[in-house]
Amino acid sequence: GGRAYFRSAKGAELKTRLTHDSTSTFYLRDEKAEDVQFDFRGSEAQQKATKQRIWRWVRGDLVSALNASEAEVEALRLRMIAMSDGSLCRVSGRVAVGFGRDLKRHVCAKCHVSCSNWGCRGCSKTFCAACMQDHLSHSARLRWMWADGAAWNSWSW
């Protein structure tokens, strides 16, 4: 993401003061233009179809096609509830991690008891030990170690 800056000076004046580099793009408004203008690209048939769809949208003919159905809204509501209580995140990202020391009070995302500052890397939610185990229970885990089994030579994912 970048930033947009709007200047009130005339385009000719701005062209003399602005310097171009590889990280910026300048768009100068056509001061003679009185109305909004669109440039449609594609074949004649594609342009015609696009214009017809824009007019259908402007008239409100696409409201039923573009708006979610009651079932879609309910499915989204349930998914948001699952996300907010920490029970839904990418399975591949479900790894217990410490989020570092701090003095803040932390609350388990699932059962709301006080807990340490550790939780799931996938959803960045804090969990108590019991809820973290439940959260991880459906994720694949892999443990690799050297043949001698030394604890300092092992890694978990």
Image (cartoon, rainbow, N blue to C red):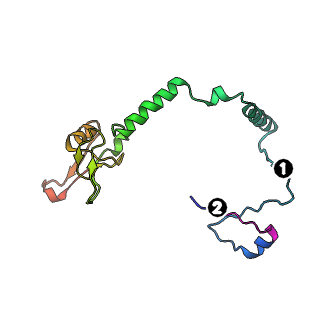
Q: Which residue matches tag 2?
A: 4
Vertical order, 28 against 58 (above or below): below
Q: Position of residue 87 (x, y in %)?
A: 33, 37
Determine if the magenta segment contains residue 10.
Answer: yes
> Which residue: 43% across, 36% down?
80
Q: Position of residue 21 (x, y in %)?
A: 65, 71
Q: Position of residue 60 (x, y in %)?
A: 72, 30
> Depth check: 53 or 13 in front?
13
Left or right, 97 with respect to 63, comes to left
Which three-letter amino acid code belongs to the residue tagged 2? Ala
Vertical order, 3 against 35 (above or below): below
Left or right, 83 with respect to 131, comes to right
Q: Which residue matches tag 1?
A: 35
Q: Which mark is residue 85?
A: none
Q: Earlier in the sequence, mark 2 or mark 1?
A: 2
Where disc 1 sits, the SS reads loop
Give yes or no for contact between labels 2 and 1 (Cβ–Cβ under 8 Å). no
Examine the rendering and report whether any part of residue 23 can be seen: yes
> Which residue: 80% across, 68% down?
10
* Quadrant in the rendering for residue 68: top right
Determine if the magenta segment contains residue 132.
Answer: no
Which three-letter amino acid code belongs to the residue tagged 1? Asp
Vertical order, 155 against 136 (above or below): below
> Which residue: 82% across, 38% down?
44
* Quadrant in the rendering for residue 142: top left
Vertical order, 45 against 105 (above or below): above
Q: Few, some or many C-alpha atoms within 10 Å of disc 2 (few <14, some 14-19, many ≥20)?
A: few
Q: Which residues are magenta?
A: 5-12
> Which residue: 31% across, 42% down?
109
Where disc 2 sits, the SS reads loop
Marks 2 and 1 sit apart, C-alpha to C-alpha, by 22 Å
